[in-house]
Image (tube, rainbow, N blue to C red):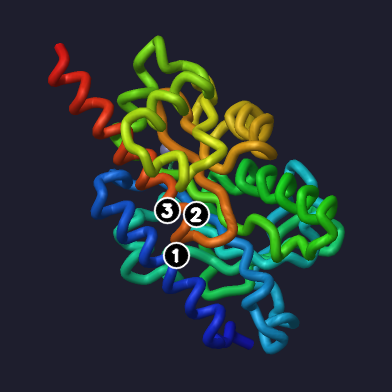
Amino acid sequence: MILKYNGPLQMQINDIARVAEYMWQKGWAERNAGNITVNVTEFIGDENKNLPAITRIPLYHTVPELAGQYYYVTSAGSRMRDVARNPMDQGIITRVAVDGKSIDILADKDLPPTIELPSHLLMHQVFAQEAIQQGVPVSAGRRVVFHTHPNELIALSHISELKSTRVITEALYEMHAEVKMCVPNGLAWVPYEMPGSMELAKASIKDLKNFRIMLWERHGVLGTGTNILEVFDAVDTLNTAAKIYLYVHSLRS
Ligand code: 2HA
Ligand code: ZN
């Protein structure tokens, strides 16, 4: 059996490819920078529910809340410019096992998932808890986690006076009137931790209930939300404000 691309699933995969292309074009995705996971359970279709596993991958951190959820996951080392060209050649469709202790790769290729998968799943677990609290299906809550390297936001993460959620959010809001409308909760500041580490994931989930976008010191951005294009727009808007911040400060000095 192979994955059947029904319309809604294909649209999700197309949107992932579009966002990967935007990241590359924006210069936010050097080499293999960035990774994407999207909960596609709502779109998978009954015809794909019984797909057998190509490979089973045990999880170090169990995620019982995510049992039976389906995810698109970029593969380890994949380049965003290649994800844009062929998302199913650079990513996989997975299902979390009923006990939440492993994930099954269902399609299309037997590729290793991004090394950031454990940290992405930790975040999807927070979204599941949020959905359960609100009484909505897990798959209808926040579905998207993506990570990218927007240069201007990373540049601001080096500035000592901006190293707090309140200060960096206010600085970006001041730069452009519409930033607050697009990102009303602001940008959460996350102090430096090793890329790919569980420490970084744990530091990020501390603020995940109140924030959708985080700035990882000297590294990049983590964006979350329901629709991947909207998450991209929020990161793009914040990075535009960061560019204006740098222009304004270079004019003043
Ligand atoms: O996936 O950007 O931080 C590559 C990265 C890790
Ligand atoms: Zn990174």
- Does residue 136 appear left or right of residue 127 in this picture? right
Question: Compared with residue 225, is residue 195 higher up or lower down, i.e. above or below?
Answer: above
Q: Is residue 33 visible?
A: no
Q: Report the front residue among 222 and 179.
A: 179
Name the image quarter holding residue 201: top right
Please give the residue where the numbered disc 1 appears in the rendered image.
16
* Numbered tag placed on residue 39 in the rendering: none
- Farthest residue to the front: give it: 177
Left or right position of 243 against 12:
left
Q: Residues within 10 Å of mark 1 (few under 14, many from 20)?
A: many
Is label 2 in a helix, a strand or a loop?
strand
**Sequence-wise, which precedes: disc 2 or disc 1?**
1
- Looking at the rendering, the quadrant in which ligand 2 lies is top left
Q: Which residue is mark 2?
A: 36
**Mark 2: which amino acid?**
Ile
Cα separation, mark 2 vs mark 1, equals 8 Å
Q: Which residue is mark 3?
A: 232
Q: Residue at x 35, y 15 (%)?
A: 159
The x and y percentages for residue 240 are 30, 40
What kind of element bears circle 3?
helix
Q: Amino acid at mark 1?
A: Ile
At a point 38% along the width and 39% down the height, the residue shown is: 238
- Dividing the picture into quadrants, the one containing residue 102 is bottom right
Q: Give the answer, above or below, for where 157 lies relative to 161.
A: below
Q: Position of residue 133 (x, y in %)?
A: 84, 51
Q: Is residue 5 above or below residue 121?
A: below
Q: CA distance from mark 3 to mark 1?
A: 10 Å
Mark closest to the chain's N terminus, 3 or 1: 1
